[in-house]
Amino acid sequence: MLPFARVTIIGLGLIGSSIARAVRAHMPTVRLTGYDADADVRATVDRLQLCDDVTESAGAAVIDADLVILCVPVGAMAAAAAELAGDLPADAIISDVGSSKAEVLRVLTEALPGATIIPAHPVAGTERSGPEAGFATLFHKRWCIITPGHGADPAAVQRVSEFWRRLGADVETMAPEHHDRVLAVTSHLPHLIAYTIVGTASDLEEVTQSEVIKYSAGGFRDFTRIAASDPTMWRDVFLTNREAVLDMLQRFSEDLTALQRAIRLGKGDDLFDHFTRTRAIRRGIIEQGQDDPAPDFGRSHE
Amino acid sequence: MLPFARVTIIGLGLIGSSIARAVRAHMPTVRLTGYDADADVRATVDRLQLCDDVTESAGAAVIDADLVILCVPVGAMAAAAAELAGDLPADAIISDVGSSKAEVLRVLTEALPGATIIPAHPVAGTERSGPEAGFATLFHKRWCIITPGHGADPAAVQRVSEFWRRLGADVETMAPEHHDRVLAVTSHLPHLIAYTIVGTASDLEEVTQSEVIKYSAGGFRDFTRIAASDPTMWRDVFLTNREAVLDMLQRFSEDLTALQRAIRLGKGDDLFDHFTRTRAIRRGIIEQGQDDPAPDFGRSHE
Protein backbone atom coordinates (compact mmCIF):
# COMPACT_ATOMS: atom_id res chain seq x y z
CA MET A 1 0.00 0.00 0.00
CA LEU A 2 1.57 3.24 -1.17
CA PRO A 3 1.12 6.15 1.23
CA PHE A 4 0.19 8.48 -1.66
CA ALA A 5 -0.95 7.94 -5.26
CA ARG A 6 -0.59 11.47 -6.69
CA VAL A 7 2.38 13.52 -5.54
CA THR A 8 3.07 17.12 -6.54
CA ILE A 9 6.44 18.77 -6.14
CA ILE A 10 6.56 22.57 -6.12
CA GLY A 11 10.15 23.72 -6.75
CA LEU A 12 12.39 21.42 -8.78
CA GLY A 13 15.93 22.23 -7.66
CA LEU A 14 18.42 19.84 -6.05
CA ILE A 15 15.97 18.53 -3.44
CA GLY A 16 12.72 18.65 -5.44
CA SER A 17 14.28 16.91 -8.44
CA SER A 18 15.90 14.32 -6.18
CA ILE A 19 12.51 13.54 -4.64
CA ALA A 20 11.08 13.13 -8.17
CA ARG A 21 13.88 10.73 -9.13
CA ALA A 22 13.56 8.80 -5.86
CA VAL A 23 9.77 8.47 -6.25
CA ARG A 24 10.30 7.10 -9.76
CA ALA A 25 12.87 4.64 -8.44
CA HIS A 26 10.96 3.44 -5.38
CA MET A 27 7.27 4.05 -6.13
CA PRO A 28 7.04 3.92 -9.93
CA THR A 29 3.24 3.80 -10.01
CA VAL A 30 2.87 7.16 -8.26
CA ARG A 31 1.63 9.91 -10.57
CA LEU A 32 4.14 12.75 -10.31
CA THR A 33 3.37 16.37 -11.10
CA GLY A 34 5.89 19.17 -10.92
CA TYR A 35 5.92 22.94 -11.02
CA ASP A 36 8.70 25.49 -10.75
CA ALA A 37 8.38 29.27 -10.97
CA ASP A 38 11.37 29.32 -13.34
CA ALA A 39 10.43 28.41 -16.94
CA ASP A 40 13.99 27.19 -17.66
CA VAL A 41 13.80 24.76 -14.76
CA ARG A 42 10.42 23.51 -15.99
CA ALA A 43 11.89 22.94 -19.46
CA THR A 44 14.86 21.02 -18.00
CA VAL A 45 12.61 18.79 -15.90
CA ASP A 46 10.46 18.15 -18.97
CA ARG A 47 13.49 17.24 -21.03
CA LEU A 48 14.82 14.92 -18.30
CA GLN A 49 11.31 13.43 -17.94
CA LEU A 50 11.47 13.56 -14.18
CA CYS A 51 7.68 14.02 -13.78
CA ASP A 52 4.59 12.74 -15.54
CA ASP A 53 3.39 16.32 -15.88
CA VAL A 54 5.03 19.71 -15.57
CA THR A 55 2.37 22.41 -15.28
CA GLU A 56 2.42 26.11 -16.09
CA SER A 57 1.01 27.15 -12.72
CA ALA A 58 1.18 26.03 -9.10
CA GLY A 59 -2.63 25.77 -8.99
CA ALA A 60 -2.77 23.38 -11.96
CA ALA A 61 -0.07 21.24 -10.33
CA VAL A 62 -1.96 20.57 -7.10
CA ILE A 63 -5.52 20.25 -8.32
CA ASP A 64 -5.78 16.47 -7.86
CA ALA A 65 -2.77 15.81 -5.58
CA ASP A 66 -2.94 13.84 -2.36
CA LEU A 67 0.55 15.01 -1.29
CA VAL A 68 2.04 18.41 -2.14
CA ILE A 69 5.69 19.03 -1.19
CA LEU A 70 7.01 22.56 -1.24
CA CYS A 71 10.71 22.44 -2.18
CA VAL A 72 11.35 26.18 -2.37
CA PRO A 73 13.62 28.35 -0.20
CA VAL A 74 12.09 28.95 3.24
CA GLY A 75 11.54 32.63 2.44
CA ALA A 76 9.43 31.70 -0.59
CA MET A 77 7.12 29.27 1.26
CA ALA A 78 4.39 31.82 2.06
CA ALA A 79 4.12 33.03 -1.54
CA ALA A 80 4.21 29.48 -2.94
CA ALA A 81 1.45 28.41 -0.54
CA ALA A 82 -0.70 31.45 -1.36
CA GLU A 83 -0.35 30.73 -5.07
CA LEU A 84 -1.81 27.24 -4.78
CA ALA A 85 -4.23 27.81 -1.89
CA GLY A 86 -7.32 28.12 -4.09
CA ASP A 87 -6.69 24.83 -5.89
CA LEU A 88 -5.54 22.61 -3.02
CA PRO A 89 -7.90 19.63 -2.54
CA ALA A 90 -9.45 19.49 0.94
CA ASP A 91 -8.02 16.05 1.68
CA ALA A 92 -4.49 16.73 0.40
CA ILE A 93 -1.57 16.75 2.80
CA ILE A 94 0.86 19.62 2.38
CA SER A 95 4.50 19.16 3.35
CA ASP A 96 7.83 20.82 2.64
CA VAL A 97 11.59 20.26 2.91
CA GLY A 98 12.68 23.53 4.53
CA SER A 99 15.65 23.72 6.88
CA SER A 100 13.92 25.80 9.57
CA LYS A 101 10.62 24.45 10.78
CA ALA A 102 8.83 26.65 13.35
CA GLU A 103 8.68 29.57 10.92
CA VAL A 104 7.59 27.34 8.02
CA LEU A 105 4.79 25.81 10.08
CA ARG A 106 3.67 29.31 11.04
CA VAL A 107 3.57 30.75 7.53
CA LEU A 108 1.96 27.65 5.97
CA THR A 109 -0.73 27.59 8.68
CA GLU A 110 -1.44 31.24 7.97
CA ALA A 111 -1.47 30.84 4.17
CA LEU A 112 -3.50 27.60 4.15
CA PRO A 113 -6.09 27.78 6.96
CA GLY A 114 -7.69 24.40 7.58
CA ALA A 115 -5.18 22.44 5.47
CA THR A 116 -3.39 19.35 6.80
CA ILE A 117 0.19 20.59 7.16
CA ILE A 118 2.96 18.09 8.04
CA PRO A 119 6.37 19.79 7.66
CA ALA A 120 9.47 17.68 7.07
CA HIS A 121 13.20 18.17 6.71
CA PRO A 122 15.37 15.62 4.92
CA VAL A 123 18.89 16.19 6.32
CA ALA A 124 20.65 15.62 3.03
CA GLY A 125 22.05 17.70 0.23
CA THR A 126 25.15 18.62 -1.69
CA GLU A 127 26.74 21.93 -2.61
CA ARG A 128 25.21 21.73 -6.11
CA SER A 129 21.95 23.43 -7.09
CA GLY A 130 19.29 22.96 -9.75
CA PRO A 131 17.32 20.08 -11.31
CA GLU A 132 20.36 18.53 -12.99
CA ALA A 133 22.19 18.23 -9.67
CA GLY A 134 19.58 15.90 -8.12
CA PHE A 135 19.88 12.13 -7.83
CA ALA A 136 17.63 9.30 -6.68
CA THR A 137 19.79 8.07 -3.81
CA LEU A 138 20.28 11.44 -2.10
CA PHE A 139 18.12 10.45 0.87
CA HIS A 140 19.43 6.91 1.35
CA LYS A 141 20.33 6.30 4.99
CA ARG A 142 19.92 10.01 5.73
CA TRP A 143 17.54 11.24 8.40
CA CYS A 144 14.27 12.91 7.53
CA ILE A 145 12.82 14.84 10.48
CA ILE A 146 9.04 15.24 10.56
CA THR A 147 7.95 18.23 12.64
CA PRO A 148 4.16 18.18 13.03
CA GLY A 149 2.49 21.06 14.84
CA HIS A 150 0.60 20.62 18.09
CA GLY A 151 -2.53 18.50 17.48
CA ALA A 152 -1.52 17.31 14.00
CA ASP A 153 -3.38 14.26 12.66
CA PRO A 154 -1.32 11.15 13.58
CA ALA A 155 -2.49 9.30 10.47
CA ALA A 156 -1.19 12.10 8.26
CA VAL A 157 2.15 12.05 10.13
CA GLN A 158 2.29 8.30 9.53
CA ARG A 159 1.69 8.67 5.78
CA VAL A 160 4.37 11.34 5.37
CA SER A 161 6.80 9.23 7.44
CA GLU A 162 6.10 6.20 5.28
CA PHE A 163 6.66 8.28 2.12
CA TRP A 164 10.16 9.22 3.29
CA ARG A 165 10.97 5.69 4.39
CA ARG A 166 10.11 4.52 0.89
CA LEU A 167 12.69 6.98 -0.47
CA GLY A 168 15.34 5.28 1.66
CA ALA A 169 15.41 7.74 4.57
CA ASP A 170 15.31 7.01 8.29
CA VAL A 171 12.51 8.99 9.91
CA GLU A 172 12.42 10.81 13.24
CA THR A 173 9.69 13.04 14.64
CA MET A 174 10.28 16.07 16.83
CA ALA A 175 8.76 19.42 17.77
CA PRO A 176 9.57 22.22 15.28
CA GLU A 177 11.28 24.33 17.97
CA HIS A 178 13.56 21.49 19.02
CA HIS A 179 14.38 20.75 15.38
CA ASP A 180 15.43 24.36 14.94
CA ARG A 181 17.87 24.19 17.85
CA VAL A 182 19.34 20.86 16.77
CA LEU A 183 19.83 22.00 13.19
CA ALA A 184 21.19 25.37 14.32
CA VAL A 185 24.22 23.50 15.65
CA THR A 186 24.54 20.60 13.19
CA SER A 187 23.91 22.58 10.03
CA HIS A 188 23.22 26.31 10.25
CA LEU A 189 26.20 27.32 12.42
CA PRO A 190 28.64 25.20 10.34
CA HIS A 191 27.42 26.91 7.17
CA LEU A 192 27.68 30.36 8.72
CA ILE A 193 31.23 29.69 9.88
CA ALA A 194 32.26 28.23 6.55
CA TYR A 195 30.86 31.25 4.70
CA THR A 196 32.70 33.52 7.13
CA ILE A 197 36.15 31.95 6.87
CA VAL A 198 36.00 31.73 3.09
CA GLY A 199 35.14 35.43 3.06
CA THR A 200 37.94 36.26 5.52
CA ALA A 201 40.46 34.39 3.39
CA SER A 202 39.45 36.14 0.19
CA ASP A 203 39.72 39.60 1.77
CA LEU A 204 43.35 39.30 2.91
CA GLU A 205 45.86 41.60 1.30
CA GLU A 206 49.24 40.13 2.16
CA VAL A 207 48.09 36.59 1.32
CA THR A 208 46.73 36.48 -2.22
CA GLN A 209 43.61 34.63 -3.32
CA SER A 210 45.79 32.47 -5.55
CA GLU A 211 47.88 31.44 -2.52
CA VAL A 212 44.72 30.60 -0.59
CA ILE A 213 43.58 28.37 -3.45
CA LYS A 214 47.00 26.79 -3.95
CA TYR A 215 47.53 25.76 -0.35
CA SER A 216 43.91 24.97 0.50
CA ALA A 217 44.67 21.26 1.01
CA GLY A 218 45.86 22.10 4.54
CA GLY A 219 42.25 22.22 5.75
CA PHE A 220 40.63 25.26 4.14
CA ARG A 221 39.19 23.36 1.18
CA ASP A 222 36.88 21.34 3.46
CA PHE A 223 35.11 24.60 4.36
CA THR A 224 34.73 25.76 0.79
CA ARG A 225 32.44 22.88 -0.08
CA ILE A 226 29.60 23.98 2.16
CA ALA A 227 30.36 27.66 1.49
CA ALA A 228 29.47 26.91 -2.14
CA SER A 229 25.87 26.05 -1.19
CA ASP A 230 22.87 27.94 -2.57
CA PRO A 231 22.95 31.58 -1.34
CA THR A 232 19.18 32.14 -1.47
CA MET A 233 18.43 29.03 0.54
CA TRP A 234 20.97 29.95 3.19
CA ARG A 235 19.98 33.60 3.46
CA ASP A 236 16.45 32.40 4.22
CA VAL A 237 17.59 29.81 6.76
CA PHE A 238 19.46 32.42 8.79
CA LEU A 239 16.61 34.91 8.63
CA THR A 240 13.98 32.36 9.68
CA ASN A 241 15.94 30.54 12.39
CA ARG A 242 17.48 33.71 13.75
CA GLU A 243 17.14 33.15 17.51
CA ALA A 244 18.58 29.64 17.59
CA VAL A 245 21.42 30.54 15.22
CA LEU A 246 22.37 33.64 17.22
CA ASP A 247 22.32 31.64 20.45
CA MET A 248 24.57 28.89 19.05
CA LEU A 249 26.85 31.51 17.57
CA GLN A 250 27.19 33.14 20.98
CA ARG A 251 28.30 29.84 22.52
CA PHE A 252 30.71 29.20 19.67
CA SER A 253 32.24 32.67 20.08
CA GLU A 254 32.78 32.10 23.79
CA ASP A 255 34.50 28.78 23.11
CA LEU A 256 36.64 30.36 20.41
CA THR A 257 37.67 33.12 22.79
CA ALA A 258 38.73 30.51 25.34
CA LEU A 259 40.97 28.75 22.79
CA GLN A 260 42.31 32.10 21.61
CA ARG A 261 43.25 32.88 25.19
CA ALA A 262 44.92 29.48 25.61
CA ILE A 263 47.03 30.18 22.52
CA ARG A 264 47.93 33.69 23.67
CA LEU A 265 48.95 32.45 27.12
CA GLY A 266 50.75 29.39 25.74
CA LYS A 267 48.54 26.91 27.62
CA GLY A 268 49.48 23.79 25.69
CA ASP A 269 47.73 21.36 28.03
CA ASP A 270 44.37 23.10 27.60
CA LEU A 271 44.73 22.95 23.82
CA PHE A 272 45.76 19.30 23.90
CA ASP A 273 42.80 18.33 26.09
CA HIS A 274 40.34 20.15 23.87
CA PHE A 275 41.77 18.63 20.68
CA THR A 276 41.63 15.15 22.17
CA ARG A 277 37.98 15.08 23.14
CA THR A 278 36.77 16.25 19.72
CA ARG A 279 37.96 12.98 18.17
CA ALA A 280 35.18 10.96 19.84
CA ILE A 281 32.41 12.74 17.92
CA ARG A 282 34.00 11.87 14.60
CA ARG A 283 34.08 8.22 15.62
CA GLY A 284 30.36 8.34 16.50
CA ILE A 285 29.45 9.85 13.14
CA ILE A 286 31.35 7.16 11.26
CA GLU A 287 30.00 4.32 13.40
CA GLN A 288 26.45 5.50 12.74
CA GLY A 289 27.01 5.61 8.98
CA GLN A 290 26.59 9.39 8.69
CA ASP A 291 29.98 9.83 7.03
CA ASP A 292 32.50 7.94 4.97
CA PRO A 293 35.27 6.31 7.07
CA ALA A 294 37.83 6.66 4.25
CA PRO A 295 40.60 9.06 5.29
CA ASP A 296 40.64 12.49 3.66
CA PHE A 297 36.99 11.94 2.58
CA GLY A 298 38.27 9.22 0.26
CA ARG A 299 39.88 11.82 -1.98
CA SER A 300 41.95 10.38 -4.77
CA HIS A 301 45.70 10.87 -4.43
CA GLU A 302 46.51 9.37 -7.81
CA MET B 1 70.82 11.67 -10.95
CA LEU B 2 69.12 11.23 -7.59
CA PRO B 3 69.29 14.28 -5.30
CA PHE B 4 70.23 12.09 -2.33
CA ALA B 5 71.55 8.54 -1.91
CA ARG B 6 71.06 7.99 1.84
CA VAL B 7 67.93 9.43 3.43
CA THR B 8 67.09 9.30 7.12
CA ILE B 9 63.61 9.90 8.47
CA ILE B 10 63.27 10.83 12.14
CA GLY B 11 59.67 10.31 13.25
CA LEU B 12 57.65 7.65 11.43
CA GLY B 13 54.03 8.73 11.79
CA LEU B 14 51.61 9.57 8.99
CA ILE B 15 54.00 11.92 7.18
CA GLY B 16 57.32 10.20 7.91
CA SER B 17 56.01 6.78 6.91
CA SER B 18 54.42 8.25 3.77
CA ILE B 19 57.79 9.73 2.79
CA ALA B 20 59.38 6.32 3.32
CA ARG B 21 56.77 4.65 1.11
CA ALA B 22 57.05 7.37 -1.54
CA VAL B 23 60.87 7.12 -1.61
CA ARG B 24 60.58 3.35 -2.10
CA ALA B 25 58.09 3.90 -4.92
CA HIS B 26 59.93 6.68 -6.74
CA MET B 27 63.62 6.29 -5.82
CA PRO B 28 64.02 2.60 -5.00
CA THR B 29 67.83 2.70 -4.94
CA VAL B 30 67.92 5.24 -2.10
CA ARG B 31 69.11 3.73 1.18
CA LEU B 32 66.43 4.53 3.76
CA THR B 33 67.04 4.68 7.50
CA GLY B 34 64.36 5.40 10.06
CA TYR B 35 64.13 6.22 13.73
CA ASP B 36 61.20 6.94 16.02
CA ALA B 37 61.33 7.65 19.75
CA ASP B 38 58.43 5.22 20.25
CA ALA B 39 59.57 1.56 20.28
CA ASP B 40 56.13 0.36 19.14
CA VAL B 41 56.33 2.60 16.08
CA ARG B 42 59.82 1.28 15.31
CA ALA B 43 58.52 -2.29 15.54
CA THR B 44 55.61 -1.50 13.21
CA VAL B 45 57.90 0.11 10.64
CA ASP B 46 60.20 -2.89 10.87
CA ARG B 47 57.30 -5.28 10.34
CA LEU B 48 56.00 -3.26 7.37
CA GLN B 49 59.58 -3.10 6.00
CA LEU B 50 59.25 0.58 5.20
CA CYS B 51 62.98 1.28 5.70
CA ASP B 52 66.21 -0.58 5.03
CA ASP B 53 67.23 0.04 8.63
CA VAL B 54 65.41 1.07 11.76
CA THR B 55 67.88 2.16 14.41
CA GLU B 56 67.66 2.26 18.18
CA SER B 57 68.86 5.85 18.45
CA ALA B 58 68.61 9.07 16.47
CA GLY B 59 72.40 9.34 16.33
CA ALA B 60 72.81 5.90 14.76
CA ALA B 61 70.17 6.79 12.17
CA VAL B 62 71.94 9.88 10.83
CA ILE B 63 75.56 8.80 10.95
CA ASP B 64 76.01 8.36 7.18
CA ALA B 65 72.95 10.23 5.87
CA ASP B 66 73.08 12.88 3.18
CA LEU B 67 69.50 14.01 3.90
CA VAL B 68 67.84 13.94 7.33
CA ILE B 69 64.14 14.80 7.53
CA LEU B 70 62.63 15.53 10.93
CA CYS B 71 58.98 14.39 10.88
CA VAL B 72 58.14 15.07 14.52
CA PRO B 73 55.67 17.56 16.01
CA VAL B 74 56.99 21.12 15.82
CA GLY B 75 57.38 21.28 19.59
CA ALA B 76 59.67 18.23 19.52
CA MET B 77 62.05 19.57 16.82
CA ALA B 78 64.58 21.10 19.21
CA ALA B 79 64.93 17.93 21.26
CA ALA B 80 65.10 15.71 18.17
CA ALA B 81 67.82 17.93 16.67
CA ALA B 82 69.83 17.99 19.90
CA GLU B 83 69.68 14.19 20.09
CA LEU B 84 71.31 13.70 16.71
CA ALA B 85 73.57 16.80 16.67
CA GLY B 86 76.73 14.92 17.64
CA ASP B 87 76.37 12.34 14.85
CA LEU B 88 75.21 14.52 11.96
CA PRO B 89 77.71 14.38 9.05
CA ALA B 90 79.11 17.81 8.14
CA ASP B 91 77.85 17.62 4.57
CA ALA B 92 74.34 16.35 5.37
CA ILE B 93 71.32 18.52 4.68
CA ILE B 94 68.76 18.67 7.45
CA SER B 95 65.12 19.29 6.62
CA ASP B 96 61.72 18.82 8.26
CA VAL B 97 58.00 18.74 7.49
CA GLY B 98 56.66 21.04 10.22
CA SER B 99 53.57 23.19 9.70
CA SER B 100 55.08 26.39 11.14
CA LYS B 101 58.39 27.44 9.67
CA ALA B 102 59.93 30.55 11.26
CA GLU B 103 60.04 28.90 14.68
CA VAL B 104 61.37 25.61 13.28
CA LEU B 105 64.16 27.39 11.42
CA ARG B 106 65.02 29.24 14.60
CA VAL B 107 65.22 26.18 16.86
CA LEU B 108 67.06 24.03 14.30
CA THR B 109 69.62 26.78 13.71
CA GLU B 110 70.15 27.02 17.46
CA ALA B 111 70.40 23.24 18.00
CA LEU B 112 72.58 22.56 14.94
CA PRO B 113 75.02 25.45 14.55
CA GLY B 114 76.80 25.33 11.18
CA ALA B 115 74.48 22.68 9.69
CA THR B 116 72.81 23.11 6.30
CA ILE B 117 69.16 23.54 7.25
CA ILE B 118 66.50 23.66 4.51
CA PRO B 119 63.02 23.51 6.11
CA ALA B 120 60.07 22.26 4.06
CA HIS B 121 56.34 21.80 4.50
CA PRO B 122 54.39 19.35 2.35
CA VAL B 123 50.80 20.64 2.41
CA ALA B 124 49.20 17.22 2.58
CA GLY B 125 47.81 14.93 5.22
CA THR B 126 44.76 13.11 6.44
CA GLU B 127 43.02 12.95 9.81
CA ARG B 128 44.72 9.60 10.54
CA SER B 129 47.92 9.25 12.56
CA GLY B 130 50.71 6.70 12.88
CA PRO B 131 52.90 4.61 10.56
CA GLU B 132 50.04 2.43 9.33
CA ALA B 133 48.07 5.47 8.14
CA GLY B 134 50.72 6.55 5.63
CA PHE B 135 50.63 5.89 1.88
CA ALA B 136 53.00 6.46 -1.02
CA THR B 137 50.78 8.83 -3.02
CA LEU B 138 50.03 11.27 -0.20
CA PHE B 139 52.12 14.03 -1.79
CA HIS B 140 51.00 13.56 -5.39
CA LYS B 141 49.95 16.89 -6.91
CA ARG B 142 50.12 18.53 -3.49
CA TRP B 143 52.32 21.54 -2.84
CA CYS B 144 55.52 21.29 -0.88
CA ILE B 145 56.74 24.68 0.34
CA ILE B 146 60.48 25.06 0.87
CA THR B 147 61.31 27.87 3.31
CA PRO B 148 65.08 28.46 3.32
CA GLY B 149 66.49 30.99 5.73
CA HIS B 150 68.27 34.14 4.60
CA GLY B 151 71.53 33.21 2.84
CA ALA B 152 70.74 29.50 2.48
CA ASP B 153 72.82 27.58 -0.07
CA PRO B 154 70.89 27.61 -3.40
CA ALA B 155 72.30 24.20 -4.39
CA ALA B 156 70.94 22.67 -1.18
CA VAL B 157 67.55 24.27 -1.81
CA GLN B 158 67.63 22.77 -5.32
CA ARG B 159 68.38 19.28 -4.03
CA VAL B 160 65.58 19.36 -1.45
CA SER B 161 63.18 20.72 -4.10
CA GLU B 162 64.16 17.93 -6.48
CA PHE B 163 63.62 15.36 -3.71
CA TRP B 164 60.01 16.52 -3.24
CA ARG B 165 59.36 16.69 -6.97
CA ARG B 166 60.44 13.05 -7.19
CA LEU B 167 57.80 12.19 -4.59
CA GLY B 168 55.14 13.70 -6.87
CA ALA B 169 54.81 17.11 -5.20
CA ASP B 170 54.78 20.54 -6.81
CA VAL B 171 57.40 22.73 -5.17
CA GLU B 172 57.24 26.41 -4.23
CA THR B 173 59.77 28.45 -2.28
CA MET B 174 58.93 31.29 0.09
CA ALA B 175 60.22 33.08 3.17
CA PRO B 176 59.35 31.29 6.46
CA GLU B 177 57.42 34.32 7.77
CA HIS B 178 55.27 34.53 4.66
CA HIS B 179 54.64 30.78 4.81
CA ASP B 180 53.42 31.16 8.35
CA ARG B 181 50.87 33.80 7.38
CA VAL B 182 49.62 31.86 4.36
CA LEU B 183 49.23 28.64 6.32
CA ALA B 184 47.64 30.48 9.24
CA VAL B 185 44.67 31.16 6.99
CA THR B 186 44.61 28.05 4.77
CA SER B 187 45.27 25.50 7.48
CA HIS B 188 45.74 26.67 11.07
CA LEU B 189 42.62 28.84 11.39
CA PRO B 190 40.39 26.18 9.75
CA HIS B 191 41.66 23.59 12.22
CA LEU B 192 41.14 25.91 15.19
CA ILE B 193 37.58 26.68 14.09
CA ALA B 194 36.78 23.05 13.45
CA TYR B 195 38.10 22.06 16.88
CA THR B 196 36.03 24.86 18.42
CA ILE B 197 32.69 24.04 16.82
CA VAL B 198 33.00 20.33 17.53
CA GLY B 199 33.66 21.24 21.15
CA THR B 200 30.72 23.67 21.25
CA ALA B 201 28.39 21.01 19.85
CA SER B 202 29.45 18.40 22.37
CA ASP B 203 28.90 20.75 25.31
CA LEU B 204 25.26 21.59 24.61
CA GLU B 205 22.70 20.47 27.12
CA GLU B 206 19.37 20.74 25.35
CA VAL B 207 20.75 19.15 22.17
CA THR B 208 22.26 15.75 22.97
CA GLN B 209 25.51 14.41 21.58
CA SER B 210 23.54 11.61 19.94
CA GLU B 211 21.41 14.18 18.11
CA VAL B 212 24.52 16.02 16.96
CA ILE B 213 25.89 12.76 15.54
CA LYS B 214 22.59 11.72 13.99
CA TYR B 215 21.96 14.94 12.10
CA SER B 216 25.58 15.76 11.27
CA ALA B 217 25.01 15.32 7.52
CA GLY B 218 23.64 18.88 7.43
CA GLY B 219 27.18 20.28 7.41
CA PHE B 220 28.69 19.54 10.81
CA ARG B 221 30.36 16.29 9.76
CA ASP B 222 32.68 18.15 7.34
CA PHE B 223 34.22 19.90 10.36
CA THR B 224 34.69 16.72 12.36
CA ARG B 225 37.17 15.32 9.87
CA ILE B 226 39.84 17.91 10.53
CA ALA B 227 38.91 18.11 14.21
CA ALA B 228 40.01 14.45 14.40
CA SER B 229 43.60 15.36 13.50
CA ASP B 230 46.55 14.66 15.78
CA PRO B 231 46.23 16.71 19.00
CA THR B 232 49.97 16.94 19.73
CA MET B 233 50.80 18.18 16.28
CA TRP B 234 48.10 20.83 16.41
CA ARG B 235 48.87 22.02 19.92
CA ASP B 236 52.42 22.67 18.73
CA VAL B 237 51.31 24.44 15.56
CA PHE B 238 49.22 26.93 17.51
CA LEU B 239 51.93 27.53 20.08
CA THR B 240 54.65 28.07 17.46
CA ASN B 241 52.68 30.16 14.95
CA ARG B 242 50.90 32.15 17.62
CA GLU B 243 51.13 35.68 16.19
CA ALA B 244 49.87 34.83 12.70
CA VAL B 245 47.08 32.59 14.03
CA LEU B 246 45.89 35.23 16.50
CA ASP B 247 45.91 37.87 13.79
CA MET B 248 43.87 35.73 11.36
CA LEU B 249 41.51 34.80 14.18
CA GLN B 250 40.95 38.48 14.91
CA ARG B 251 39.96 39.12 11.28
CA PHE B 252 37.70 36.07 11.25
CA SER B 253 35.97 37.21 14.45
CA GLU B 254 35.30 40.64 12.97
CA ASP B 255 33.79 39.10 9.85
CA LEU B 256 31.69 36.73 11.94
CA THR B 257 30.41 39.66 13.99
CA ALA B 258 29.39 41.44 10.79
CA LEU B 259 27.37 38.43 9.62
CA GLN B 260 25.89 38.02 13.10
CA ARG B 261 24.76 41.63 12.95
CA ALA B 262 23.27 41.12 9.48
CA ILE B 263 21.25 38.18 10.82
CA ARG B 264 20.12 40.09 13.89
CA LEU B 265 19.00 43.08 11.81
CA GLY B 266 17.44 40.90 9.10
CA LYS B 267 19.70 42.25 6.34
CA GLY B 268 19.02 39.57 3.75
CA ASP B 269 20.80 41.36 0.90
CA ASP B 270 24.07 41.55 2.84
CA LEU B 271 23.89 37.83 3.60
CA PHE B 272 23.06 36.97 0.00
CA ASP B 273 25.97 39.03 -1.34
CA HIS B 274 28.42 37.44 1.06
CA PHE B 275 27.20 33.91 0.30
CA THR B 276 27.48 34.52 -3.43
CA ARG B 277 31.08 35.64 -3.58
CA THR B 278 32.37 32.68 -1.56
CA ARG B 279 31.43 30.32 -4.42
CA ALA B 280 34.25 31.59 -6.65
CA ILE B 281 36.99 30.31 -4.33
CA ARG B 282 35.59 26.80 -4.44
CA ARG B 283 35.65 26.90 -8.23
CA GLY B 284 39.32 27.99 -8.17
CA ILE B 285 40.28 25.14 -5.84
CA ILE B 286 38.63 22.57 -8.07
CA GLU B 287 40.03 24.04 -11.30
CA GLN B 288 43.55 23.86 -9.82
CA GLY B 289 43.13 20.23 -8.84
CA GLN B 290 43.37 20.88 -5.09
CA ASP B 291 40.04 19.18 -4.39
CA ASP B 292 37.71 16.59 -5.84
CA PRO B 293 34.95 18.09 -8.02
CA ALA B 294 32.50 15.29 -7.13
CA PRO B 295 29.57 16.75 -5.18
CA ASP B 296 29.40 15.99 -1.45
CA PHE B 297 33.13 15.00 -1.54
CA GLY B 298 32.10 12.02 -3.68
CA ARG B 299 30.44 10.41 -0.68
CA SER B 300 28.58 7.24 -1.49
CA HIS B 301 24.80 7.50 -1.26
CA GLU B 302 24.21 3.82 -1.93
Image (cartoon, coloured by chain):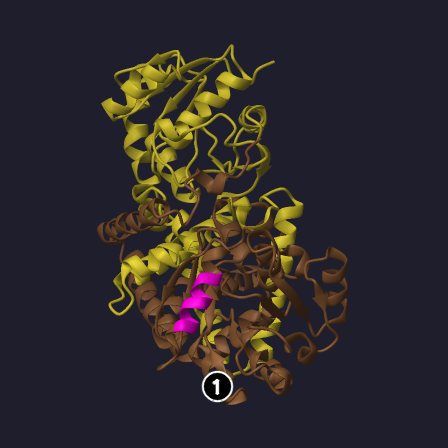
Chain colours: A yellow, B brown
**Where in the figure is residue B85, as x and y percent of width and height?**
60, 85
Q: What chain is tagged by disc 1?
A: B
Q: Residue at x 58, y 23 (%)?
A: A166
Which amino acid type corresponds to the residue marked 1 in the rendered image?
A: Thr
At label 1, counting other C-alpha atoms closer than 10 Å, the crowd grade (few under 14, some 14-19, many 20 or more) is some
Residue A207 shows in this picture: yes
Residue at which label 1 appears = B109
Between residues B159 and A163, which one lies in front from this camera angle? Answer: B159
> In the displayed structure, would residue B84 be above or below residue B39?
below
Between residues B264 and B25, which one lies in front from this camera angle? Answer: B25
Q: In this rendering, would A75 be left or right of B189?
A: left
Between residues B196 and B188, which one lies in front from this camera angle? Answer: B188
Q: Quadrant of residue A129?
A: top left
What's the magenta region?
B155-163
Q: In this rendering, would B47 be left or right of B4?
A: right
Tell me, yes or no, whether the highlighted magenta stretch contains residue A242. no
- Image quarter where the N terminus of chain A lies is top right
Dominant SS type (magenta): helix
Q: Quadrant of residue A164?
A: top right
Q: Residue at x 48, y 31 (%)?
A: A118
**Where in the figure is residue B221, as x and y percent of width and height?**
53, 50
> In the displayed structure, would residue A70 be above or below residue A217?
above
**Where in the figure is residue B36, as x and y percent of width and height?**
68, 71
Residue B208 shows in this picture: no
Tell me, yes or no, whether the highlighted magenta stretch contains residue B158. yes
Q: Residue furthest front?
A: B1
